[in-house]
Image (cartoon, helix red, strand yellow):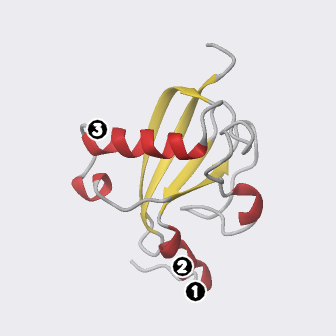
Amino acid sequence: MAGCEAVLTVRLVRSFEHRNFKPVVFHGVNLDQTVQNFIQLVRDDIATRRGLPPPFKTYAYDTMKIIHQAHGAKTNELVMSLEDDENLILQDNQTLRAAGVANETEVAFFRKEDYGVYKANPKTAW
């Protein structure tokens, strides 16, 4: 594998309250592309990905946050941690590498508005 290509897992989060998410693996990701370009690549891919339920394909995802780095500690939260947003939420104008993304990183892809509502009142429903 080239030094700038990585395997990333993107966790598509449809609902924080219902813990409704689906992980999707991306191979050969260029870490020197911008976060904005990677978001567009993921949107384009999931729109046509086989085996992915339709509600996940058409959801209005707009934000990415690092969940887990390879060989690092994991959170106890089932969907994603609600802490350290200023360091873990990826900024559109940064490259993936500058944002802290490395090989085997797992990132959440979600709608920022949903995250704000859940963070203000982190209750789960069954």
Tag 1: amino acid: Asn
Which residue sits at x=71%, y=65%? Answer: 85
Question: In the image, 66: left or right of 123?
Answer: right
Question: Are discs 3 and 1 less than 8 Å apart at CB?
Answer: no
The residue labelled by disc 2 is 118
Helix, strand or loop at label 2? It is: helix
Q: How far apart are marks 3 and 2 (CA)?
A: 28 Å
Numbered tag placed on residue 121 in the rendering: 1
Question: Are discs 2 and 1 less than 8 Å apart at CB?
Answer: yes
Residue 5 position, x and y percent, is 60, 22
The residue labelled by disc 3 is 49
Q: Is residue 87 above or below residue 105?
A: below
Task: Report the quarter where the C terminus lies.
Answer: bottom left
Residue 96 position, x and y percent, is 65, 39
Q: In which quarter of the image is residue 106?
A: top right
Tag 3: amino acid: Arg
Tag 2: amino acid: Tyr
Q: Quadrant of residue 30?
A: top right
